[in-house]
Amino acid sequence: MRNPFAGRAYAVFGIRDYRLFISARFFLTIALQMQSVIVGWQVYALTKDPFSLGLIGLAEVIPFLGMALFAGHVADMMARKRIILISGLVYFVCASLLLILCRESLGIESHAVVTAIYAIIFVSGFARAFIFPAQAALMAQIVPRELYVNSSTWNSTIWHIGAVTGPAIGGLIYGWSGIVNAYACVLLFAAISLRQFMRMKPYPLPPKTKDEPLLESLKTGLRFVMQKKVILGAMALDMFAVLFGGAVAMLPVFASEILKTGPEGLGLLRAAPAAGAVVMALFLAYRPPLRNAGKKLLFGVAGFGVCMILFALSTNFWISFLLLAFSGVFDNISVIIRHSILQIFTPDEMRGRVASVNSIFIGSSNELGSFESGLAARLVGLVPSVILGGCMTLLVVFHVARFVPAVRNLDLQHDTK
């Protein structure tokens, strides 16, 4: 019988634990994306204040930033599968509390509900801080070096498929069946994810070159990233692009006030970037972005910034949808290249700490970007704030292209061998 994974583009799927890992991450992504849409619409419906959406991101990023470096240290000292399971269970409990909280029979005042939502999101930020570096480090243990780019491509593809279906499912179920059923589906997908992670075999930690106390271990991870210019430049490029260029946090306002649609339309808008990213990821599975990877990275981030500027100017739902989809096309180029850089240039015994530094640069920028978007929208207006963010993204690309030659001249053609 012919091996269905014999082709180079699908080689990584021949690894059983990678299939379990990627399916678990897929269902967890659906749960997280559904919850993001549901919480955003719920909070905006209760407050009618764009700044309240930014506070959702702030509530998650504070514990995330506070624990990120320590979480990376733990990921290099403790079995990574165990960290993922514990963190996933914490998230499941938080999602259960959101389900309980949305029941009108509780008779809680709207301002108290919003405060409680912020508190629950705050707790879930701790879980996210630990699960991010543990997942990144575990995937590198599952996959051999020669398949790093292949695994990064499919990791991004599956993640974006989840990011497409998650918001769409969340918005549609919220609009058609109500918030209670929407949150119940979040719990279902989170439970499936935990089950898939449990089926994976345990992986021992890589051997340590030396024993280090906590503070020295954290300094070692930071020092490695700061000295490795190609890693630092790629992280900084994406961090500032997402920080200034993202309009996702403001989508409930665009959907309600400018594009005149409901939660169903919001779900489609949230899914659009991921839909574009899936198309690009499938293309890159057959044409990996190895040659001139640095220039392609800069091109992808610049294209993302242009799409954000045009999106801010659009008043037509389908044009806005297409622009968001193209933003996902460009963004996924940089995502795959950045993930490949991290896997190729990071030693095995430091993957948790480097992933945690990456999470500070990249993961936190989503939530800080949400807060920045909400604050900018209040200060200068919704549309001008997104235009300004897109322009700042282009400025960041120009700065990195000119002053960080390690990124501009990057070529991954020979580094995967």
Image (tube, rainbow, N blue to C red):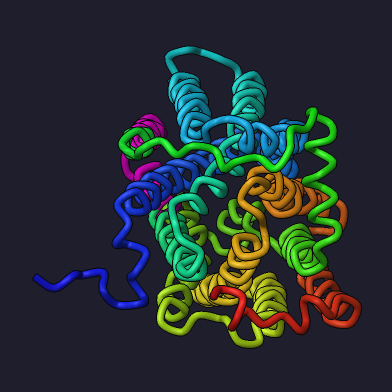
Magenta stretch holds residue 10: no
313 or 215: which is nearer to us?
A: 215
Measured along the vertical axis of the image, is residue 306 above or below residue 270?
below
Residue 184 on the magenta segment:
yes
65 with respect to 415 (left or right): right
Query: The N terminus is located in which quarter?
Result: bottom left
Residue segment shown in magenta: 166-191
Residue 139 x/y as whole percent: 49, 51
Q: Nearer the viewer, residue 41 or 150?
A: 150
Q: Could you say which is closer to the camera, residue 199 or residue 68? A: 199
Residue at 67% across, 57% down:
346
The quadrant in which residue 417 appears is bottom right
Q: Is residue 140 left or right of residue 341?
A: left
Q: Nearer the viewer, residue 238 or 40?
A: 238
Q: Residue furthest right?
A: 403
- Residue 272 visible: no
Q: What residue is shown at x 60% (from left), y 81% (from top)?
A: 414
Magenta part, dominant SS: helix
Residue 27 percent location from the top left of the image: 38, 45
- Residue occupying image coordinates x 81% and y 44%: 220
Picture coordinates of residue 311, whole percent (x, y): 64, 72
